[in-house]
Structure formats: C-alpha cells, structure tokens
Image (cartoon, rainbow, N blue to C red):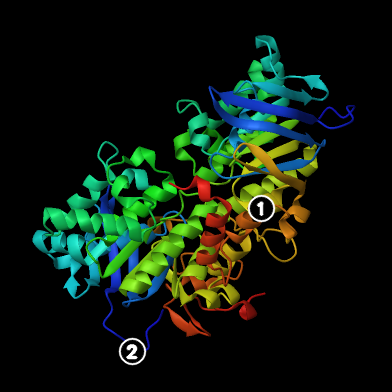
Amino acid sequence: MSGTETGPVLQVTGLRKTYGSAVAIDGVDFTLERGGSLGIVGESGSGKTTTARILVGLERATAGQVLLDGEDVTTPSRRDRRRRARSIQMIFQDPYLSFDPRLTVEESIAEPLRLHGHGDRARIRATVATLCDQVGLSTRNAAALPRDLSGGQRQRAAIARALGIEPRVLVLDEAVAALDVSIQAQVLTLLDRIRRDTGVSYVFVSHDLAVVRYATDTVLVMRHGAVVEEGGTEQVLSAPRHPYTQLLLASVPAPGWDPAAVAAANRALAPADRG
Amino acid sequence: MTTTVDPRPVLEVEGLSLSVPGHDGPVPLLADVGLVVRPGETVGLVGESGSGKSLTIRTALGLTPRRARTAGRVTVDGLDVLSAGRGELRELRRHTAAMVFQDPRASVNGSRTIGAHLVEGLRAGGVDRRQARARAVELLERVGIREPARAMRRHPGEFSGGMLQRVVIAGALSTNPRLLLADEPTTALDVTTQAEVVSLLTSMQAEAGMGMVFVTHDLTLAAAVCDRVVVMYAGRVVEVAAGDELFRSPAHPYTAALLDAHPGLHGPRAALRAVPGRPLALAETPSGCSFRDRCTEADDACAEEVPALRRHGGSDAACLRPGREAWA
C-alpha cells in the first residue's frame, strides 16, 4: 500500500460520542501500527461498534480526534469522505445486506473501482479477476448473484470488494460471527494471509475472544463505552488484570466449565446492571 | 446428572428419515437419525447449517415441514409423535414437552405484559386464573427476575435479552414438562449472559428431573454442558459420545475438524486448520460417507456405503477409520 508513510496508520484520541444524554463511548484512545491488527472486544452496549462506525465515517464523533496517516479525518467534508473511503473500508457481519441483490458479485466488486477511477473497463475486469482469485472465489461464483452464494462466499466477496481500492485500514465488525465454524476458519486464515501479503491494517471488532486471539496483535477491552484494559493480545488474554476481562475469559466454555460460578462472578461485578 | 437406573427415555428417536417434495422428486433432509434422552439427562445436538439439528427436535414436537414425508419412530414420553393426532400433539406441546428458541423477542408478544404471557400459558394448561397468577410470580422469582410481582406488569421491551430469555424459560417450565428442547438458547445473548442462562437451564432441569436436548453450533459449549453429545452432519448422526470424551478424543474426522477449526483460548496459539469446502445438505452429499469430500482421511472405501455407527473407545462413530490414531 502506500509504502513511503511511516508511523502509525491510525491514531485515535479522546473519542466521545453522545446521543442526547446517553453516552455511547467516552475517552477512547488507541494507536494502530501499519500492517498491525487491533482487536476491540466487548459485549452489547460496550461501544465497540460505535467506535468502528466513527472510524469509517458512518457516525460523527461528539469529541476527540481520528488521525489517518497523520491527517485529521474526524469531521470530514463531502469530498474528504470519498478520500477516506479509499483509505478505510468496512466489512459487516452480514455481507448479504451490503450487496445490491440485482448485481452479480463481480459487478459489485467492480463498482468501487469505477467510483475511484481505477482505470478503463479492461483494467477493472483484470483487477476483479485478480481479487476473486485472491479470496478464493471461482469464476462461477463471480458471475453469480449474491443470493446464490453461501455466507462464507459472500463474506469473501465483501473482502474482495473492500480490498479492490487498496485501503490502508480494514474495519471488520463481527465479520466472521455469522459463519459456520469450518467456514469461519477459512475466512480467518484468508484475512491473515491478505494482511501478510498486502500490509493492510485491521481493526477487528468482535465479541469472540478466541477469534480475537487468533486475528490480532493488540487488543482493547471495552465496557459501557470505556476502555477497561488494553495491551498485547497474548498478554491481555493470558494474564488479564481487569475483573471484567477476567469475567469475559471465564465466560468462554471449555472442558470443566462452571457456568454457575461465572454467573455468580457476573452478578458480583455488575449488581447495578440487572433488571 | 445421569441416573444409575435406566428409566424409560423421555425422548426416543429411531431411524428417523424426513424428506420434503421438490421440483425433481423428494428432497431428503434427515436420514436414519437416532437419539435417546432419559429423564434428568442433558443431550447436546451439535452441527453446522443444514445438519438437521433443529429439524430433528422440531419433529419431536410434531412440527414437521409441510408435506414432509417421514419414516422411523419418534416417541415422547410414550407418545408416538409421527402418528399422533391433532389433539394428542396439542397435549404434547401443552404438557409434556416445551421449547426455548434462540431469539426471546420472537417468542413473546411485544405488546403484551410478561404476566399476560405467562398466565395465558398456564391457563391453557388448565390452571385457574388466580392460581395461574400466583404460579407465574413464583416462576419469575425462580428464574431470577427481581421484584417478580412488578415484573408481571412490564412489557418485553423493558427487559434485556438475557432477562427476557429467563422469562421465556419460566414460561416453558410453567407446565412442568418432561422434556425441554432448547434450540440455540444462548446464541443471541452476550457471552457473560450465556453462562447465566446455561446455569439456570441446567439447574432447573436437574431439579425437575426433566430430559433436555440442547441444540447448538458450539461444540465446546455442548461438551461442557451435556452428559452426551450427538454430532450431526448433512442430516445424519456421525458421532455420539460423552461431552468430555468428545473433546479429548474425537472419533469422527468431522468432529476433530470442528475442534481444530475453532481458534482456542488456551494453550499455545496454534495455526487454524480450516476444513475445505462448506457444510452440505443431505441432498447434496456424495455416495457413501457424507463428509468424505472434505475429509483428509477418505479413500475409495468411503464412497461405497454410508458407514454405520460403530463403537470406538468412548464414542459411537460413523467412520470406517475412527480415532485420531488411525489418521495420517
């Protein structure tokens, strides 16, 4: 990607978002290294998705700053938005909702290339073919409509479309959560390979600690709109310091798992949340 | 959990096959499915999309797809479900068996109060109005809803997903069923809430001595919660084993592949072993073993006929070469 740049690709400071009197996120700071992968872990209401949506410009921050390659993109103008789209792309949980059902998969993958002026028809066709190849979609898959693809194939298509304009950052919001386990592993290994091959950086939003362990280098744990713990993923998951991170880890089923003990720990941590 | 005597199963599925009409003849969805659940026992039913796990337990309530053709036997507390009449099925669903679904918001009418929902279920079971109210409050208290009498007047929208799933469980248990069918009951909930709902389900099940079928896509969850786990692939049962046994030494390559495909939280960070291809529906499967196209151990013999379940270690597995020690 833009190989001349140095320093972190994304720097976020003091991010805050309120809806009326409700505070969605407050005081979120983080840095994403070039070619790195940052996990944002949390449950519903943690603010992880709000944070992701602010990064890609789907929401406007109430306060704070997002620097992309050192450039302030917090409150973009219309023209800046397209430039930002070129730098940051997002993948959603259900890729079916983000495809035009009337366009074939290859037409959908070609669309951002046309929009961002990636050459003439022939060149775009060639790029689409390369992209499909990169994510493991067959020629038949590429010529099909989204509804004729399986969930895993649609997610591959979404990844191909996002990668076409060579973004520097890919924000993945629960991108493998809806996939069957055997397919989830395929998409995770694909994402891993793409990051190594292209140097793209990931912001990986997920509720699944095991997925985050596999897919990220650093991690933020969010709860009620605030970051409660952060650090190297292996470090945080093997020696969690915050009681909430400990509870999240204990909540993951494993042989000998005691759900009653986890439930008791949950009640001890959050007596005020119940009802 | 598992009782020492061997009481009559509360659910017995034997050789269940099911097909629905398609453009070019019948489309098979289940083939030769077997399942036994005794009182006080929790049996996990695990599989990916198209495995037939949900269809199997729906059949236990007589909820088969329209114009479906079935073969085999499904018995719930002595009732032959496949040949039961409307009246018998209604009694079955009212008294004998109850079901909890993935999304609690789809199970409760959002415009009515929690109290109305619970009282209606109890009244349908033949309880009079005053007793039904008292019993509903009791049930809410039992599933851990604070201030149950006030909660009766609240609407589903005022509850979190986890709390509403508790209300749904209270409703399912209100008629003291012999069999509880839980279809992905925690999939839509937060991770920390999942433990609460699972521990509630298992404690109520043990207390009432019910049989429970726990349907999930999460093999680890099933192994941790269930006495026995039944793994399904493409409309067939491929392995049956005790939960911890399955986890420690899977006998069927598909079970092993599911475990290897899931990124672990413990131990060294290992490379993921993705399973090639995608989960199939029964109608798309090749001859012989349904999993052979995706299996690294398959050879010509696997194409000949569908392997029967055979004993291997602590498992019953439908594989010609079961157990990791037999694999390259």
Front position among marks 1 and 2: 1
Residue A226 picture quarter: top right
Between residue A258 and residue B296, name the one nearer to us. Answer: A258
What residue is rendered at 45% in x and 48% in y?
A: B188
What residue is rendered at 83% in x and 23% in y?
A: A70
Q: Check disc 2 and report the residue beneath it.
A: B5
Residue A34 x, y percent position in the rendering: 82, 35
Q: What is the CA distance from the residue labelled 1 to the residue labelled 2?
A: 43 Å
Residue A62 x, y percent position in the rendering: 64, 21
Between residue B214 and residue B261, name the one nearer to us. Answer: B214
Is B190 drawn above or below residue B256 in the view shown? above
Q: Chain of mark 1?
A: A
Q: Secondary structure at mark 2?
A: loop
Q: Chain of mark 2?
A: B
Residue A166 seen: no
Badge 2 amino acid:
Val
Left or right: B24, with B241 as reference point: left
The residue lying furthest to the bottom in this view is B5
Between residue A251 and residue B66, name the one nearer to us. Answer: A251
Between residue B138 and residue A90, name the one nearer to us. Answer: B138
Badge 1 amino acid:
Thr
Residue A270 x, y percent position in the rendering: 55, 50
Residue A86 x, y percent position in the rendering: 71, 22
Asked if the residue at tag 2 contacts the one at tag 1, i.e. Cβ–Cβ closer than 8 Å, the answer is no
Residue A33 seen: yes
Left or right: A263, with A112 as reference point: left
Q: Secondary structure at mark 1?
A: helix
Name the quarter where the N terminus of chain A is drawn: top right
Q: Check disc 1 and report the residue beneath it.
A: A245
Is B290 drawn above or below residue A231 in the view shown? below
Is B108 drawn above or below residue B284 in the view shown? above
